[in-house]
Amino acid sequence: MAKIPILDDLLIKATSGQDPKYGRLAMKIYLRVFLLVFGKAFPYLLKGLWNALKGNSEERKKAFLGGTKVWAEDAIYVTKSEVKVFNEINPPEKGHFIFLNHVNEMDFPYDCLVMRKPYLANQVIKKTLFAYWWMLAMGSQVFDNSKARTIAISVRNLIKGLKETSYIVYPEGRNTYTEEIQPIKKGMIKIAFEENIPIYLALKSGVASYQKVQSGNKIGYLGVGYFYPKDFATYSALQDAIQAAMEKAKKELDALTAGMLNPKP
């Protein structure tokens, strides 16, 4: 993608000061969604729309979830990257939060590929245009925490949605642009505790490498385990336990992912 100074300035701002080369890569990956929708992912689009017309929301979501694999495979192809899952990751079908660490804009296609679940996202996701529309079609929800009223509505929608699926949640609450686990926000933890929503924890490593090098990247995933709110006296105790587990398991995963870069002879 050609260098355009004004665009680069906007990309630097949008990615919290990252190198514009990374910003151009992220923009390219998201703009390619439009091409994929009317290309390799078109059969999934037709199947999803057909089931939407029939009122079959479950099959509609399955079709659009299937289409996200095309996006992930395209991102892997464009960046000449490798994604490896180091243990069995089987996200619960419904009724759970699926906690993942959040790194940058390159998260979404790979998380879709490995987890195969919709998102519980904040308002920022609306900026991704076609990707946002596709994510809604596959059953994702936008959690609006701007006002007390919208929070109440979002919680009701969440509880209703959990009867049919599980949601990917980023407990750090933002793009961190680092491989280091950041303090997790209390919002989703508190909701999980108060509504007794079990949490499945998984982690990824290597995504921050795109901020320095845009091709030949190695991405690793690791399933960590379950956390049940009923096992904790307070939501802060649950929060502390998950924070500690994320930090400990991330070190293990980083070592495994580093082994992908330097394989043993």
Image (cartoon, rainbow, N blue to C red):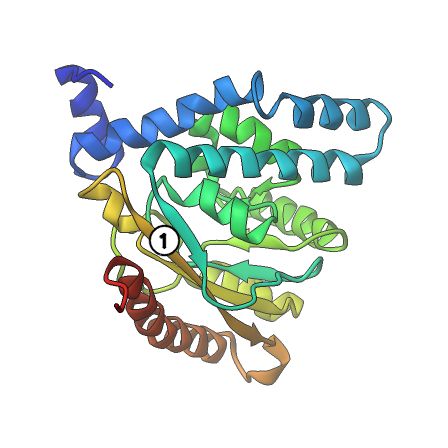
Instruction: Identify the residue position indicated by label 1 in the image.
Output: 219
Q: How many marks?
A: 1
Classify 10 Å Cα crowding around label 1: few (below 14), some (14-19), many (20 and above). Answer: many
The answer to which image quadrant residue 203 occupies is bottom left
63 versus 37 height, above or below: below
252 or 176: nearer the eye? 252
For the point 24% across and 38% down, the residue is: 214
Q: What residue lies at 74% left-to-right and 50% top-to-bottom? A: 160
Residue 44 percent across, percent down from the top left: 67, 28
Q: Secondary structure at mark 1?
A: strand
Which residue in the rendered view is the most extreme toward the front? 265
Which residue in the rendered view is the most extreme toward the left? 5
Q: Quadrant of the N terminus?
A: top left
In the image, is 215 to the left or to the right of 37? left
Res 32 seen here: yes
* Front position in the image: 256 or 100: 256
Residue occupying the point 84% across, 34% down: 56
Q: Is residue 221 left or right of residue 27?
A: right
Residue 182 seen by the camera: no
Q: Which residue lies at the image location 53% right of the left edge and 42% below the top edge?
A: 144
- The three-letter code of the residue at mark 1 reads Ile
Q: Position of residue 224 (x, y in %)?
A: 49, 72
x then y, percent, for residue 29: 38, 29
Task: Where is residue 158? Give x, y as percent.
Answer: 66, 50
In the rendered image, the vertical position of residue 162 relative to residue 213, given as above or below: below
Q: Quadrant of residue 191?
A: bottom right
Apparent side of residue 172 relative to residue 261 in the rendered image (left or right): right
Quarter occupied by the C terminus = bottom left
Query: Is 44 drawn above or below residue 225 in the view shown?
Result: above
77 and 114: which one is in front? 77
